[in-house]
Amino acid sequence: MELSFYKYQGTGNDFVILDNRDQRYNSLTNEEIHFLCNRRFGIGADGLMLLNAREGYDFEMKYFNSDGNESSMCGNGGRCLVKFAFHMGIVRTSYSFIATDGPHEAEIDERGDVRLKMQDVTEVKEHHGDEVMNTGSPHYVKTVQNLDTFDVFNKGREIRYSHAFQPGGLNVNFVEPRSEDEIMVRTYERGVEDETLSCGTGVTASAIANFHNEQGFNEVSVITRGGRLSVEFERNRDGSFTNVWLCGPAEKVFEGTILLPQ
Ligand SMILES: N[C@H](CCC[C@H](N)C(=O)O)C(=O)O
């Protein structure tokens, strides 16, 4: 089958996007998605998304990691899918779409950056002095020194596969505070099984773990290897985090067609 695809990236986290509003790609297998994400034999990406039609929403987002398996929410992917929808003629001042973790709002600002509203975070657990939370995907957040030379792959893999987080595993973020409201983050991503240049739900978890205002509005600037993102959130008296927004660039790279192996 010949397949038309679009390639997008959000701060270096890159995705194959398929317009599936006519459901033509519903029968794609995990093996085929894994092939499409392969950086040598396929298009190459950290993940693949289907833009589906959905009653009551501007669209539905289905997300697959590059291992070919459907997975939890992807923050950078959601931002790229909003920009794709805009390019495909779905033009809104505020977008409303549904993903595996529920409904999301999103906006495209005057610079073309995409602001994505993330799910509330109601529970942050402590684990060996580090923090574990779910921002639409499960994340482990560890503060380290000298992040630039830190062994993200091996240390990340160790935590991702550790017994404590089986069977599903989780994504692992290493954070180095730079100033009161700026952090650096590098992430080992589950389902990619490698470091990605940025991870939206991971950046969100890392910012929340490094909040600076005990109560009320917080804004954290996040430096990743793929570029800069910002995370805004309210910290509430009950310890929950609401009105969480992930903001940053999301760009089309190219489009094309590819023949799936028979
Ligand atoms: N690999 C993640 C999903 C994608 C997360 C990341 N690409 C993002 O931008 O949030 C997981 O399986 O939990």
Image: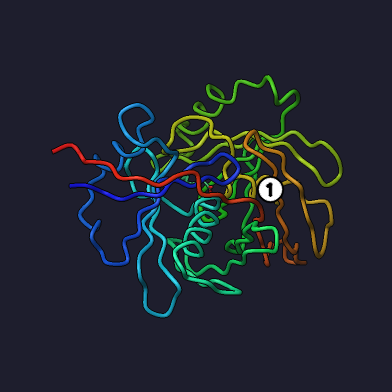
Q: Secondary structure at mark 1?
A: strand
Q: Nearer the viewer, residue 10 or 207?
A: 10
Would you say 130 lies left or right of 48 here?
right
Would you say 169 lies left or right of 11 here?
left
Would you say 81 lies left or right of 248 here?
left
Residue 250 is situated, as x and y percent measured from the top left of the image, at 58, 51
Q: Is 146 drawn above or below residue 232 in the view shown?
A: above
Residue where numbered disc 1 is placed:
229
Q: Could you tell me the amino acid type at mark 1? A: Leu
Residue 45 location, quadrant: top left
Going 66% across and 62% down the picture, which residue do you hit?
244
Going 83% across and 57% down the picture, which residue do you hit?
214
Residue 239 is situated, as x and y percent measured from the top left of the image, at 72, 61
Question: Mark 1 packing: few (<14 Cα in 10 Å), some, or many (20+)?
Answer: many
Going 52% across and 54% down the picture, which residue do you hit?
80
Furthest residue toward right: 180
